[in-house]
């Protein structure tokens, strides 16, 4: 094995955001050894990393972050200098169906990883870094105005956001109590390639391609702040290398959209790309029963990340959305693979009664 300047553990690297972070680190830092630990749940897919899997500075390990013995063995096998922790259950609707799975992975799994890292690193703790990737949903729901800043009190309202808020608190507890060097970031909604088609944007793209109903919750008036996934990966790179230990950073693109406006935008864009008469896809829009406890609006103030660490998003939304649609149109095999089997059961359970 060649000499590497750092060995970094990335958890959840086979998922949507994790795969973009792994790719960025493997290609940008050939001097680092990147170890991707993933349980390969329904959301994890090694096909997301086909292009870099043969890179000499990349290793994959299958394992569950809640498995104490497995995590201890992993930290004995590799001398990690840092952890970038993304592994999680990530979908709000699934958290409503099965909340305890979210407590298990997001809360117990994160606490287990913190404990394993602190124990393995106890002799030179100050040289290490545990970077926890979190969400803006921990801040709760905004009204029509205002933004989430790093000082906004936590007010999670779904089992998903409560489990992520809890994991954030455990990360800070390990910092204050055990002196583990940590950094946290809270990002807004991501979109881009390799996004599992249970989330709004890839689900709508997939249903438009297949001329299936487009299920808009409630009146479609809820607002999300969208960031291109590669911009999130770049922000994680910036924060990992330049962020201050013990601090947290909000990540977002100042890019708020009502759900219904995104769906119309996609319909128009895809009618053109698919050679369908204008208005064809919009006829598929179906307003369905609202999500329980549906947060009205998320909006991130990312000033601190911009001013202190110099990060800015690189893409305008329409440009990013077009790249995303093109990716789905040219990766129908990927979509077919991830939507076979379990996805069909999930889809039926989630949408048939709405
Ligand atoms: P994802 O669901 O696409 O991927 C999660 C990955 O974690 C999968 O590869 C899965 O196999 C793995 N995983 C799940 N449980 C595991 C376990 N017990 N042990 C090991 N691996 C396990 O999620 P994502 O959208 O890529 O989100 C990644 C992280 O970013 C999450 O922590 C999420 O909370 C956070 N986040 C997501 C968004 C977003 O818009 N998707 C926004 C902000 C923050
Ligand atoms: P989602 O992509 O699940 O992200 P989150 O809930 O974490 O923000 O949903 C984004 C928005 O889209 C949210 O307001 C719920 C709404 N939505 C629909 O209207 N229909 C759908 O089928 C889905 C999955 C989401």
Image (spheres, helix red, strand yellow):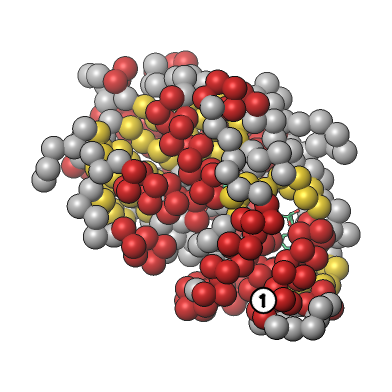
Residue at image x 43%, y 47%? 21
State the image coordinates of residue 192 (x, y, percent, origin top left). Answer: 57, 57
**Which quadrant of the figure has residue 197?**
bottom right
Task: Please name whichever residue, 239 or 73, is drawn nearer the observer in this view of the structure.
Answer: 239
State the image coordinates of residue 159 (x, y, percent, origin top left). Answer: 65, 46
Residue under label 1, please give it. 273
Residue 12 appears in the figure: no
How many marks overall? 1
Q: In terms of secondary structure, where does tag 1 sit? A: helix
Q: Residue furthest left?
A: 1
Task: Please tell me whether residue 299 is drawn above or below residue 37 in the rendered image.
Answer: above
* Location of the C terminus (image quadrant): bottom right
Task: Please tell me whether residue 5 is drawn above or below residue 216 in the rendered image.
Answer: above
Residue 337 appears in the figure: yes
Task: Please name whichever residue, 211 or 234, is drawn nearer the observer in this view of the structure.
Answer: 234
**Which quadrant of the figure has residue 60?**
bottom left
In the figure, is residue 47 to the left or right of 167? left
In the figure, is residue 296 to the left or right of 192? right
* Location of the N terminus (image quadrant): top left
In the figure, is residue 96 to the left or right of 27? right
Residue at image x 40%, y 28%? 241
Residue at image x 68%, y 21%? 151
């Amino acid at each position: 094995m060649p000499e590497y300047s750092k060995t970094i553990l990335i958890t959840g690297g086979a998922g949507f955001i994790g795969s973009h972070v792994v790719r960025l680190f493997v290609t940008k830092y050939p001097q680092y050894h990147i170890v991707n630990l993933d349980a390969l749940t329904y959301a994890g897919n090694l096909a997301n990393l086909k292009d870099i899997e043969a890179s000499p500075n990349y290793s994959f390990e299958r394992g569950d972050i809640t498995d104490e013995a497995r995590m201890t063995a992993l930290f004995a096998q590799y001398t990690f200098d840092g952890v970038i922790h993304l592994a999680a259950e990530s979908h709000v609707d699934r958290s409503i169906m099965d909340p305890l799975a979210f407590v298990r992975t997001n809360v117990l799994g994160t606490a287990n990883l913190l404990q394993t890292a602190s124990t393995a690193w106890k002799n030179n703790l100050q040289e290490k870094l545990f970077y926890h990737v979190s969400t803006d949903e921990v801040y709760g729901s905004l009204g029509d105005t205002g933004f989430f800043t790093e000082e906004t009190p936590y007010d999670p309202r779904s089992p998903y956001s409560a489990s992520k808020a809890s994991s954030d608190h455990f990360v800070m507890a390990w910092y204050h109590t055990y002196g583990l060097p940590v950094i946290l970031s809270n990002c807004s909604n991501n979109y881009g390639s390799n996004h599992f088609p249970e989330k709004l944007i890839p689900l709508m793209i997939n249903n438009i391609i297949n001329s299936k109903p487009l299920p808009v919750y409630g009146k479609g008036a809820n607002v999300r702040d969208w960031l291109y996934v590669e911009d999130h990966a770049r922000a994680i790179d910036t924060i990992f290398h330049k962020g201050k230990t013990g601090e947290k950073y909000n990540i977002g693109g100042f890019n708020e959209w009502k759900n219904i406006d995104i769906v119309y935008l996609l319909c128009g864009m895809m009618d053109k790309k698919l050679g369908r008469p204008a208005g064809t896809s919009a006829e598929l829009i179906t307003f369905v029963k609202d999500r329980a406890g549906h947060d009205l609006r998320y909006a991130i103030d990312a000033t601190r990340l911009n001013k202190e660490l110099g990060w800015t998003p690189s893409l305008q939304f329409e440009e990013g959305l077009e790249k995303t649609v093109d990716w789905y149109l040219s990766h129908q095999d990927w979509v077919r693979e991830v939507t076979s089997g379990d996805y069909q059961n999930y889809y039926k359970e989630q949408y048939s009664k709405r």
